Image (cartoon, rainbow, N blue to C red):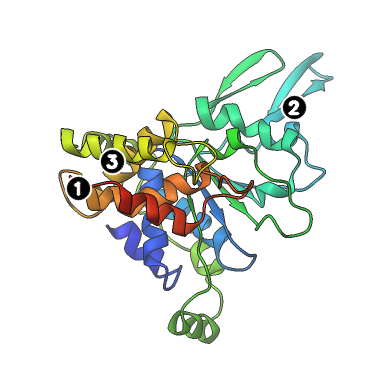
Amino acid sequence: MPVLNAANQIILGKETEVRLAATCLLAGGHLLIEDLPGLGKTTLAHTLARLLGLHFSRIQFTADLLPADITGVSIFDRERSDFRFIQGPVFSQLVLADEINRATPKTQSALLEAMEEGQVSIEGETRALPSPFFVIATQNPSHQIGTFPLPESQLDRFLMRIELGYPGRDAERALLTSGGRRTRAEQLDSLLTPEQLPQLQREVADLYAAPPLIDYVQALVEASRHTSVFRHGLSPRAGLALLAAARAWAWLAGRDMVLPDDVQAVFPSVARHRLSSAQGGNQASSTDIDSLLKRVAIP
């Protein structure tokens, strides 16, 4: 896919992570990127917005950010002797919620309705958001100073969660030699239009998933509920998210049906942030996720 090729010229050495991000958007979901500062999270969001031709806005989440700073506010217009609503930055096709866990839970909750319903209710009136509508949120590790944990209801709104990690030696050498990629991302030409993206999403949603494949997805979800490793299992919404992401992963591979390999490829990114360890409040480890995959038979 040309979008992937162009994005990989900006985000060097992270082909799998870029594909997962594109998978999330094609599946119609919101994306959470968690990692240390300076690893390209914001650049990836900028890159996808430019390549997909989406109207983009960035919200810097801080401890003093208020819900109205996200959704908008009504101000009194003296000339009209009436109140006029000023739209907040959430009224964009792709919203970058930068460092989302540096805001208080009250402010984080301002995105809940937007991410679930594609609308916001303000001052007794419901206002529709643009279509398509995506949230890409970046998050710093929870052990860093000044962070607030995302509530489970907020985490569940994200279809996928990924990490970028440090670049490989060759990719980092290229960055050091040629400079950062943020400026290049801002100069990218759009490869799609907002009108084309919903058509691609419909193609993804129509991709064939055989009954045994559906059985496999259901078995994974059920297995997460019948183990002492996790505090609680995956919800039906997680099962729907897993199937949608598997369809998008298969579509990007050029296939017309979903394979168990597609489910396994996206499962960690769909499931990990929805599962917490029974030994504490932390998210499930990669080892726990891999163990769950190995326990469930492949059809």
Asked whether the beta carbons under mark 2 and mark 1 sit within 8 Å of each other, the answer is no
Question: Residue 114 is drawn in which quadrant?
Answer: top right
Identify the secondary structure beneath mark 1. loop
Identify the secondary structure beneath mark 3. helix
For disc 2, the neighbor class at 10 Å (few under 14, some 14 to 19, many from 20) is: some
Question: Where is the N terminus found, in terms of image quarters?
Answer: bottom left
Q: Which tag is nearer the camera, tag 1 or tag 3?
A: 1
Amino acid type indicated by mark 3: Leu
Image vertical order of residue 134 relative to residue 264, above or below:
above
Q: Name the residue under label 2.
A: 73
| Mark sitting on residue 259 | 1
The residue at 29%/59% (across/down) is: 2
Report x, y in % for residue 184: 50, 68
Q: Which tag is nearer the camera, tag 2 or tag 3?
A: 3
Amino acid type indicated by mark 1: Leu
Query: 164 or 279: which is nearer to us?
Result: 279
The answer to which of marks 2 and 1 sits earlier in the sequence is: 2
